[in-house]
């Protein structure tokens, strides 16, 4: 059976079409900075309470913003649904001595030993 590829409709705002979830998220953050999204959304909500038309001079900018947010939410929903299928391996503890800094291995695993040694002055 052939799988249907879901279109995230990125061609309107990113300039290219993608069916990969991670490419769509990357395109979303490459399209504009988070401050732009926050500012536009805040102004849109404020104008909705005022009952006025937001950015009357350039309505296409709001339409493109809407399409970008809609694509992003669609991707987030699918990532959440697919995350149940993913298995994450536990990372092994780093065996390197560099991350211990000046602590011994026992002090690194139990910081209370270091604190007792340091504040009581006894080895």
Image (spheres, rainbow, N blue to C red):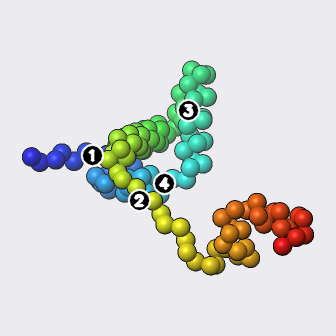
Q: CA distance from mark 3 to mark 1?
A: 26 Å
Binning the other alpha carbons within 10 Å of mark 1 as few (below 14), some (14 to 19) or many (20 upward) gives some
Q: CA distance from mark 3 to mark 4?
A: 20 Å
Q: Of the numbered discs in the image, which one, if any, rests on residue 7?
A: 1
In this rendering, is residue 101 above or below 60?
below
Residue 22: quarter of image? bottom left
Q: Residue at x 42, y 52 (%)?
A: 25
SS class, disc 2: loop
Q: Name the residue tied to disc 3.
A: 44
Instruction: State the image coordinates of residue 19 (x, y, percent, origin top left).
Output: 28, 52
Q: Is residue 107 left or right of residue 71?
A: right
Binning the other alpha carbons within 10 Å of mark 3 as few (below 14), some (14 to 19) or many (20 upward) gives some
Identify the mark nearer the N-term, 1 or 4. Answer: 1
Residue 114: quarter of image? bottom right
Identify the mark nearer the N-term, 3 or 2. Answer: 3
Decide if residue 15 is in sight here.
no
Q: CA distance from mark 3 to mark 2?
A: 42 Å
SS class, disc 1: loop
Binning the other alpha carbons within 10 Å of mark 4 as few (below 14), some (14 to 19) or many (20 upward) gives few
Identify the mark nearer the N-term, 1 or 2. Answer: 1
Residue ranking furthest to the left: 1
Residue 4: quarter of image? top left
Identify the mark nearer the N-term, 3 or 1. Answer: 1
Identify the mark nearer the N-term, 3 or 4. Answer: 4
Q: Is residue 77 left or right of residue 103?
A: left
Q: Residue at x 11, y 48 (%)?
A: 2
Q: Name the residue tied to disc 2.
A: 89
In this rendering, is residue 122 above or below 112?
below
């Amino acid at each position: 059976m052939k799988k249907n590829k879901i279109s995230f409709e990125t061609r309107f705002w990113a300039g290219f079409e993608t069916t990969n979830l991670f490419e769509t998220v990357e395109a979303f953050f490459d399209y504009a900075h988070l401050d732009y999204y926050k500012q536009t959304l805040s102004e849109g909500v404020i104008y909705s309470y005022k009952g006025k038309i937001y950015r009357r001079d350039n309505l296409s900018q709001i339409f493109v913003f809407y399409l970008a947010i809609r694509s992003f939410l669609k991707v987030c929903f699918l990532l959440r649904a697919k995350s149940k299928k993913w298995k994450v391996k536990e990372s092994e503890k780093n065996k390197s001595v560099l991350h211990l800094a000046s602590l011994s291995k026992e002090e690194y695993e139990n910081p209370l030993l270091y604190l007792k040694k340091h504040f009581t002055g006894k080895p």
